[in-house]
Image: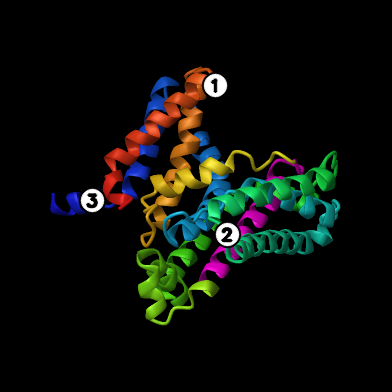
Amino acid sequence: MASLRTMLAKPWIWSFIGAFVVWLATIAFTGGYGAGGMITAALSLAVFTVIVGVGQMFVITLGPGNVDLSLPANIGLASAVAMKVMDGNDAMIAVGLIAALGCGAAIGAANYLLIWALRIPPIIATLSASFIIQSIDISYGRGLQIKPPPGFADFTNWQILGIPVLALLTVVFTVGAATALQRMIYGRSVLAIGQNIRAAWLAGVNVGRIRFLTYTLCGALGGIDGALLAGYFRGANVDIGNEYLLASIAVVVIGGTSVAGGKANVPGVWGAGLFLVLLLTMLNTFGVSAGVRLVLTGLIIVGVITAAGGEKAVR
């Protein structure tokens, strides 16, 4: 019992419990039909939310007010850049991925430079940047008909025993992110800044450099996410990243990361990503209309956060 109470006290565990309950409710409604396929689909789609969610988590962990609202525009532009560079050629896959990564990293770096140079809140800087990025994307990627190279499209949909390879690689990536957060100087510096930025500065942490690296990292993850999305959905699209604005923030909060900064939970991002995908699947299975679906999604998310001790998590 003591070990169970200890486990339930961890905020991130509730995201996995929520995902499991939603999955059970859906298969109960369908009489068990498609249970395995539902998990495979959830893993395939959750990957994209997890990748940008980890980047958003690092930014939010820096402390109150830190958030990247340019991710949707970043993803859209990077998807177009990747597809144009690859040009349907398998030999250009690596170059296209590097181009998307570089595009995203440049956007992340520019976001921080706006924050630093103009001394404006991150939410304003990144929102303003998103309009500029979106304008560039519209002129650069509008009407882009280039399909991903066959090898890249196959890779993003490749499965081993029903488990998407992208999901396995993303698990490895999140393990690395968790290790960096807890064991490396960079990760500990991010946590220290989020807990008390002045104390971190007095302790010798180069606050400006760490914040610059964090926004650049978040942008780079948005860029690689855009390329992977274009491969998975067989093409770039200006609106391909739209759903990841609220989703990237939701998985961070539901996963147990404190919006007040200084506390992050990498495993919870996975649980929350699966929860959101399975929740949408459940509501679609039940035949719920789009309007009601949004209301129910919001209410259920609030319920999960409350069950996880949301008030304590944000302090």
Q: Mark 1 points at which residue?
A: 290
Residue extending farthest to the left is 1
- Find the distance from the CA under tag 1 to the CA under tag 3: 34 Å
Q: What element carries label 2?
A: helix
For the record, the magenta segment spans: 210-237
Residue at point 43% right, 44% down?
A: 272
Residue 9 numbered tag: 3
Q: Where is residue 242 in the image (x, y as percent from the top left)?
A: 63, 39
Q: Is-magenta flag for residue 79?
A: no
Q: Name the residue under label 2.
A: 218
Residue extending farthest to the bottom is 204
Viewer-nearest of discs 2 and 3: 2
Question: Pointer 3: residues within 10 angstroms few (<14), some, or many (20+)?
Answer: few
Question: Pointer 2: residues within 10 angstroms few (<14), some, or many (20+)?
Answer: many
- Find the distance from the CA under tag 2 to the CA under tag 3: 29 Å
Instruction: Out of 42 and 13, give the one closest to the viewer.
Output: 13
Looking at the rendering, which quadrant does residue 306 occupy?
A: top left
